[in-house]
Image (tube, rainbow, N blue to C red):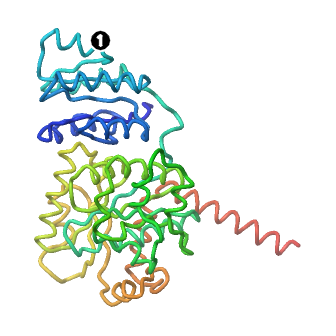
Amino acid sequence: MTSERYIALFNADASASIGLRAAINGLPATKVVTEVSDLESLGDALRRLTVSVLIVNLDPDPDRHIALLERVATQFPDVPIIAMSERTDSQMIIHAMRVGCQQFVFKPLDRDDLRRAVDRVAVSRPGLAPAGRRICVIGASGGVGATTIACNLAMEVAHLTGKTSGVMDLQLEFGDVATSFDAAPQYTLANLCEVDGELDQVMLDTAITRLSCNVAVLGRPRNVAEAHVVTADRVAAVLRLMSNCYDTVVIDTPRSFDRITLNALEMADHVLVVLQLIVPSVRNAVRLYQTLMDYGMPDDRVHIIVNRFRKGVGSIIPEDVQQQFRKDVFAVIPNDYQCVTNSLDFGHPLMADAPNSAVRASIRELASDLLGDEQREVVGAGARNKSSLFGRIFNA
C-alpha cells in the first residue's frame, strides 16, 4: 500500500489554484497540506508541516521564482522539489535543476507525468503522519445546524470510544462552538497563531479547554479583530498536532474556499455537508459539493447530511437529494425544534439535556457509522470487559 504523500504547493497565480490542487489531490495517496504564495509563508510551512514534496509553480514569473527555489533548496535540503511551468526553453529548465529542483513538469499538466515525478522524489516519512481522524462539518447555508451537529458528534464519538475528542472552531469571526458547550475559553486558536517558533503539545494543552464531557475545545478568536492573525499554515500545523493528541478531531468549518478552509478540508478524512430540504439549501449544497470535486476531493470522503427532516412536510424528500448528488444520503437528522433550542439556550449537549431524543439518537448513529470497524471493536471490547467484571463479582 502506498504511503500518504503530503504536498506543499507554492503558487503565486491565484487563477491556477483550483486546477493545480485538483491535479495533485487526484494522485493516489497524495494530499495538498498547504498552498502558499510568498517565501516567508513557505519557509514557515516547511518548518512546521510534514512535507513529502514541495511543488513550485514557476509561472507567471519563472526567473523570480527560480531565485526563490534556490533559497528554499539551500534552507531545506531534505525536501524534494518539483517545478512546473508553461515555458519549455532548455536554459530555464537547466537553471531550475542547478539550483535544486529534482523534477520538472510542463503545463498544461499531464496527470501521469505529474504522478511519475511525485513517485520518483516523494520522501516517505513513516510515523510522522497524524493518526487521528479528522471530520470537517460544513453547512450548505447559514442556520442549517452544522455547528450543533459538529459539537454533538464530537461528544458522541467520545462517548462511544471512551477517548477524548477534539473540536476546532474555524468560524473565526462568529463561531459558536464554545457557546454550545457553555464554555468560556481563556485561550483560543488566535493565541496559538501568535506564538513564535514551532508549536508543541504543551502549547496546545494550554490553549485547549477541556470539558467534563470528554471533549477538548479549541475556540475561535475572542473578538473579530483577532481573526486576522490566523493563517492557513498555522491552522494546518495546529490541526496536525491535535490529530496526534486526539483520535478524533471535529472541525466546525466555514463556507469559504480561502486557504485556511481548503487546508482543513484537504486534511479531512470525512467532510460532512449539512443541508435542509429546502430549495436554497439543496442548491447551495450542490454547488459546495461540486466545488469540492473541482478541487480534487475524493468523492468517498464527502457525505451528505440532511438535517431537520420532518416527514410529510415540504416538497423535497431525501430521495430527491440522492438523485441530485447521485449518491446515498449518509444520515438524516430529524427535526425537534424545542429539544435543540433548549440545548442551545443552556449550552448543554443533547446527550445531557435530551438523551432519549430522536435527534440525539440520529447523531449517535452518525458517529457510529463514521467510526465503522473501530466502533465494533470498541463495543466488543466493552462487552468482554463487562462480562469479565461480572464474572469476578459472581465468582468471588
Relative to the observer, which residue lies in front, 79 or 309? 79
Relative to the observer, which residue lies in front, 328 or 286? 286
Q: Is residue 281 above or below residue 24?
A: below
Q: Which residue is mark 1?
A: 98
Q: Position of residue 333 (x, y in %)?
A: 32, 74
Residue drawn at x 34%, y 27% as measured from the top left: 72
Relative to the observer, which residue lies in front, 232 or 82? 232
Q: Position of residue 138 (x, y in %)?
A: 28, 63
Q: Is residue 240 above or below residue 208?
A: above
Residue drawn at x 37%, y 83% as measured from the top left: 344
Amino acid type of the residue tagged 1 in the rendering: Arg
Looking at the image, residue 20 sits to the left or right of residue 151; the answer is left
Residue drawn at x 24%, y 18% as measured from the top left: 104
Q: Is residue 251 above or below residue 54?
A: below
Question: In the picture, which quadrant includes the N terminus?
Answer: top left
Label 1: how many Cα within 10 Å (few below 14, some 14–19, many 20+): few
Question: In the picture, which quadrant includes the C terminus?
Answer: bottom right
Looking at the image, residue 380 sits to the left or right of residue 94; the answer is right
Say if residue 32 shows up in the picture: yes
Relative to the observer, which residue lies in front, 353 or 312? 353
Q: Position of residue 161 (x, y in %)?
A: 55, 63
- Kindly state the secondary structure of the residue where label 1 is placed: helix
Say if residue 330 shows up in the picture: no
Q: Is residue 92 above or below residue 220?
A: above
Q: Position of residue 225 (x, y in %)?
A: 28, 66
